[in-house]
């Protein structure tokens, strides 16, 4: 299934990355538990904590009483409205029936003196009186609801005044809490960042670098997730200031790294070809030649007649292709063995250490 002997090496690299990520994830989980259990980190402040307890209790009692009264009046008004609707329907139905009865009745006597007419008229008057009483009850409850609403509005103004008076103390306490939380997180995160920087600078070639790399990932997560969101703002000045300082440090580091790289390249250019070859890994040299760049100066390999790569780099003079001393076939100068006859290379490539 695997056509290359280098496949296990690539699989090992992937596995080591998996180890780094898994190790970092467990460190992140452990760090989150530690930070979450620290005293004072997750303390929640509310503005009610800075209002006089007696005034706050009295205000809450009045507010609860008004809410209960409003709910009770709302329920009574709903029942009164139902009674008013029923009374109105009964009166309207009886009145319509009476008008129809009067229109079709034929009497020889004066209808106003007819006992049945008088009885039905009194019945209508009673229904109308019931309707007026139900309407009066609804109006009375509406007036009570209005008084409760006005009292609630007045109480809300009192509560707003209490909160406004406590707002200054609340903001000061919240600011102190933010500083305390940030200080705790900074005290935990800063040593992690320092240790991660030391590992990157000194242990990148160590055999235990995959574990160190996992710790570096954990330190970066702690910085960007556990620390930066809790950075005090001061209207954005602190955060922008920290961004300016961090970008300036990164810029200085990048400039110095570029200078070291250029100085190293200049130093390499002054070395002999054999010395330069010894500083280039075997796999690196083959990969660069395959990509069409010189392993020594990393510039594009020029082409000669027929589009074939030239034997020597036109920029640094390094030998790129030569001929086998046994069969004379043209080959990559970095091959340790001739791909045509299998003879051991005797040219400049023989001085290059083979990478396993």
Image (spheres, rainbow, N blue to C red):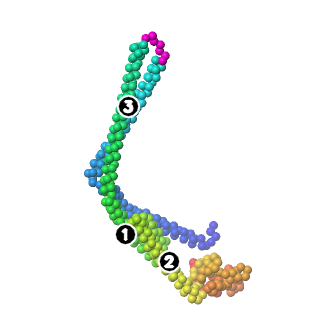
Which label sits on residue 187? 1
Query: Cα distance, mark 3 to mark 2?
Result: 85 Å
Q: Tell me if residue 58 comes above or below residue 273 in the rendering.
A: above
Most distant residue in the top direction: 108
Taking the spot 37% from the left edge, 23% from the top edge, the residue there is 126
- Read off the magenta span: 103-109
Which quadrant holds the N terminus? bottom right
Residue 299 placement, left or right of 237: right
Query: Helix, strand, or loop for circle 1?
Result: helix
Report the mark closest to the observer, 3 or 1. Answer: 3
- SS under mark 3: helix
Label 2 belongs to which residue?
254
Q: Nearer the viewer's eye, disc 2 or disc 1?
A: 2
User: Foreground residue, 335 or 327?
Assistant: 335
Do labels 2 and 1 touch, CB within 8 Å? no
Judge the density around disc 2: few (<14), some (14-19), many (≥20) Cα neighbours within 10 Å: few
């Amino acid at each position: 299934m695997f056509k290359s002997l280098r496949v296990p090496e690539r699989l090992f690299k992937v596995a080591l990355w998996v180890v780094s990520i898994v190790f970092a994830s467990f460190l992140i989980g452990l760090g989150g538990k530690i930070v979450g259990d620290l005293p004072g980190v997750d303390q929640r402040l509310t503005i009610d904590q800075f209002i006089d307890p007696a005034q706050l209790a009295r205000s809450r009692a009045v507010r609860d009483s008004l809410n209960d009264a409003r709910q009770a009046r709302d329920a009574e008004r709903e029942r009164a409205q139902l009674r008013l609707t029923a009374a109105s329907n009964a009166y309207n139905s009886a009145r319509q029936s009476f008008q129809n009865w009067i229109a079709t009745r034929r009497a020889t006597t004066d209808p106003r003196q007819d006992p049945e007419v008088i009885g039905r008229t009194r019945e209508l008057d009673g229904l109308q009186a019931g309707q007026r009483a139900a309407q009066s009850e609804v109006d009375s409850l509406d007036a009570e609801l209005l008084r409760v609403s006005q009292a609630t509005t007045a109480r809300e103004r009192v509560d707003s005044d209490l909160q406004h008076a406590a707002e200054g103390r609340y903001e000061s306490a919240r600011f102190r809490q933010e500083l305390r939380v940030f200080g705790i997180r900074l005290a935990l995160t800063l040593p992690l960042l320092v240790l991660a920087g030391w590992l990157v600078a000194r242990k990148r070639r160590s055999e235990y670098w995959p574990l160190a790399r996992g710790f570096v990932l954990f330190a970066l997560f702690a910085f960007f997730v556990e620390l930066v969101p809790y950075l005090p703002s001061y209207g954005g000045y602190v955060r922008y200031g920290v961004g300016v300082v961090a970008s300036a440090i990164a810029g200085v580091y990048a400039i110095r790294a570029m200078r070291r790289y250029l100085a190293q390249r200049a130093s390499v250019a002054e070395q002999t070809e054999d010395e330069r070859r010894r500083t280039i890994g075997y796999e690196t040299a083959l990969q660069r030649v395959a990509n069409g760049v010189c392993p020594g100066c990393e510039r594009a390999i020029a082409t000669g007649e027929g589009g074939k790569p030239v034997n020597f780099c036109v920029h640094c003079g390094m030998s790129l292709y030569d001929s086998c001393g046994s069969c004379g076939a043209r080959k990559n100068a970095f091959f340790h063995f001739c791909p045509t006859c299998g003879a051991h290379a005797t040219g400049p490539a023989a001085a290059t250490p083979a990478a396993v």
